[in-house]
Image (cartoon, rainbow, N blue to C red):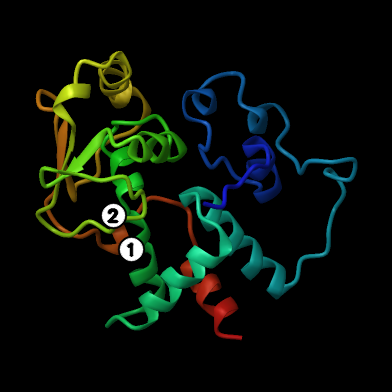
Amino acid sequence: MAKYKEAKCKVCRREGAKLFLKGERCHSDKCSFERKPYGPGNHGKDKKRVTEYKLQLREKQKTKAVYGMLEKQFSIFYDRATMKKGAAGTNLLRMLECRLDNVVYRLGLATSRSQARQLINHRHFAVNGVATDIPSYILKEGDVVAVKQKTKIAKIFKETIESAGERLSIPSWLELNKDTMSGKVVRLPEREDITEDVKENLIVELYSK
């Protein structure tokens, strides 16, 4: 499986936004974007010409980084979004939010989406009682995500859940049960439920060229 290997802090600095790619570090004084809020490299502080294409490309690259996806997988998601009823941009964001790794992160069961993917790959989670190791699995309304019984005593999950309230709030379309370390998709997210700073219209314009 392909894997993005570039330093994550450089991604935030290149996109000019704090993308919270490194979990707890992003909430601390060690955050590179807070210390160096400009692009990486020798010319990071230089003013660069901004074109319409650049705005569209950077928005797509930023969204890919936020959800931890490479180009091929992201384009597949976009193609699927265009085949659904409704606005392609909204459909795309809804599909990205309903990915298993994102839901695990949103529920506070992992400190970052990358950690969520690793935990899922190691089969620490079950969907509707069935263990899965597919981070890109798309959850539907009514699906239940739970930490597998034999891993519930793991220290990492207890600490992560306890600190979740300090890091993020559980979105209204999800429901968390801390006692059972499980969460439920009570409904599919609407556009106003998605708090990520994504201008999906720019992504649609880029792919429509």
Instruction: Indicate the position of residue 51 as horizontal and vertical percent values.
Output: 75, 71
Which one is in front in this view, the residue at disc 1 or the one at disc 2? 1
Q: Callout 2: 10 Å neighbours few (<14), some, many (20+)?
A: few
Instruction: Indicate the position of residue 29 as horizontal and vertical percent values.
Output: 59, 18
Give the left or right position of residue 120, taking residue 41 as reference: left
Q: Give residue 115's quadrant in the image.
A: top left
Q: Residue at x 25, y 62 (%)?
A: 190
Instruction: Indicate the position of residue 55 as horizontal and vertical percent values.
Output: 66, 66
Q: Which of the pair 157/169 is nearer the observer? A: 157
Where is mark 1, residue-wise? Answer: 95
SS type, badge 2? helix
Ranked by sequence position, the earlier of labels 1 and 2 is 1
SS type, badge 1? helix
- Spatial CA distance of label 1 from label 2 is 13 Å
Which mark, residue 193?
Answer: 2
Q: Quadrant of the C terminus?
A: bottom right
Q: Residue at x 10, y 23 (%)?
A: 179
Instruction: Indicate the position of residue 194 as horizontal and vertical percent values.
Output: 34, 54
Which mark, residue 75?
Answer: none
Mark 2: amino acid: Asp
Mark 1: amino acid: Met
Q: Which of the pair 169/73 is nearer the observer? A: 73
Q: Which of the pair 22/54 is nearer the observer? A: 22
Give the left or right position of residue 3, taking residue 89 as reference: right
Q: Which of the pair 23/125 is nearer the observer? A: 125
**Label 1 close to label 2 by CB (< 8 Å):** no
Residue farthest right in this picture:
42
Give the left or right position of residue 25, taking residue 49 as reference: left
Q: Residue at x 22, y 23 (%)?
A: 151
